[in-house]
Amino acid sequence: VVSSDRAGSADYDPSRYPPMAVTADLVVLTVRDDELAVLLVRRGEPPFAGVLALPGGFVRPQETLRQAAARELAEETGAGFRSVHLEQLASYGDPGRDPRMRVITVAYLALAPELPAPRAGTDAAEAAWVPVARLLAGSADGDRPARGAVPRLAFDHDQILADGVERARSKLEYTPLATAFCPAEFTVGQLRRVYEIVWGIPLDPRNFHRKITGTPGFLVPAGGTTAGDRGRPARLYRRGDATLLQPPMLRASLD
Amino acid sequence: VVSSDRAGSADYDPSRYPPMAVTADLVVLTVRDDELAVLLVRRGEPPFAGVLALPGGFVRPQETLRQAAARELAEETGAGFRSVHLEQLASYGDPGRDPRMRVITVAYLALAPELPAPRAGTDAAEAAWVPVARLLAGSADGDRPARGAVPRLAFDHDQILADGVERARSKLEYTPLATAFCPAEFTVGQLRRVYEIVWGIPLDPRNFHRKITGTPGFLVPAGGTTAGDRGRPARLYRRGDATLLQPPMLRASLD
DNA sequence: GTAATAGTGTCTCTAAGACAATATGAA
DNA sequence: TTCATATTGTCTTAGAGACACTATTAC
């Protein structure tokens, strides 16, 4: 232990402490076909060539961590990412997580409404939405026992994905963030389906309606109603400006 | 935009994307003299020479991010850090946050029972517990209007501190983490004082007692009672193995 | 005795959970 | 018509907040 270590974060000597690579990786979640899905890319080069991984890339010298994540998100999803919620998730930097060199990745969580299928034919890497239930077998909530093997993601991306999904699930409890999965105008029923799919449990439509419409600032009436698919047409809402659910809507305890 | 950017986090070329320095900084909180206090060091060198800063230092090539934080914590607080809670807070990496070079810091939050005063005379840097109320003026909860100027911390450490304090405050709501501020054996009254000090609001002793003792796994009776200072002696408890408060104990909404 | 803190019990009120009942469209 | 979904309302119950009251020590 060198004595200069104690003086705080500024006391460094780059030649003694070799610098590291810093990347921004993304857990992009959406609701598609009544399932929670994550955007994955198939790696083209070793290590983990041919293996699915979270999208991500280098943080450039002149951009913030968030800007790097937003840039990667735009590159992966195309232009239609305006209404995407983006927040920092956590950082992962175990030595050996990348066999070639020390890489610290700052993971971001993005929640998006249903987007067009990942850009086709524009570039080399294959990208696709994959239901998270197929990737999280062994998780506590018993999503679907794996038929056959569970595909493993590259690096420590299984852990990052699990952390991202858990963050999303818990944030639905105490924020109006579920609206990030919905288009600009949506119905209470659509919002409820988001909750049910993300949490993996059914909710009572009546009680959900009462709770959501009774929380000031959660929803703003948008005027119209849906042209009915089936059943009575529903009123349309936009997301309100509330940032917290007080009191929260708790998932049933899973005992 | 280079096309190779899309292939995921592994597709990098260190010569094209210059590596960065990675540090681990600490927000170490404790309760001292009926105040929430944070461990700070006074910087000895520019930039920000003479300015207070969070303790921290380099992540070494062979250690995990968490190990780096734990090592810094041990160096700052001496050996008595066994029962300290340590969790990752967030990462901060804006270009220019350190004027000399690009530095990404992974901040960790540590919650400690009252520790011996920071190591005296062992090393160069001065370290001290500073009440956070003196550092957070302008925050939403109206901690004490600043008499005179509010000392500013080095770099973006004001932001990191604010994030750490908010994390601690919110975690008291839905976890038994307040016990991390208490010694191994403690009374319900001591625990309540932790809540009151961290949240900055008074709590009803009767209702608090009912809530805490009624939550299975929060407290384990330790057998004895306090030798009375004043009033009736109180039973001693140890922290239980519960990891979640269900239902949570919510702070009064501060409208 | 008084003062101070610990602990128990009781009442009220909010809000969640479990439903009944009605509304409004499509097939 | 039947079916499906939306929306409103009602009842029950868990739990938070307010607060009276008792218990046990120091002085």
Image: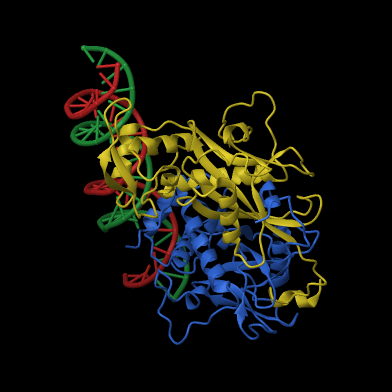
Chain colours: A blue, B yellow, C green, D red
Residue in view at x 46 percent, y 62 percent? A195
* Relative horizontal placement of residue B116, taking residue B216 as reference (left or right): right
Up-down relation of residue A236 to residue A214 (above or below):
below
Q: Position of residue A121 (x, y in %)?
A: 73, 83
Q: Which quadrant of the view contains residue A154?
A: bottom right
Q: Quadrant of the C terminus of chain A?
A: bottom left
* Relative horizontal placement of residue B55, taking residue A187 as reference (left or right): right
Regarding residue A166, the answer to whether it shows in the image is yes
Q: Position of residue B182 (x, y in %)?
A: 42, 42
Up-down relation of residue D11 to residue A131 (above or below):
above
Up-down relation of residue B86 to residue B54 (above or below):
below
Q: Relative to the observer, which residue lies in front, A234 or B59? A: B59
Residue in view at x 72 percent, y 38 percent? B51
Q: Relative to the observer, which residue lies in front, A75 or B60? A: B60
Q: Quadrant of the N terminus of chain A?
A: bottom right
Up-down relation of residue B21 to residue A125 (above or below):
above
Q: Relative to the observer, which residue lies in front, A169 or B193? A: B193
Q: Which quadrant of the view contains residue A130?
A: bottom right
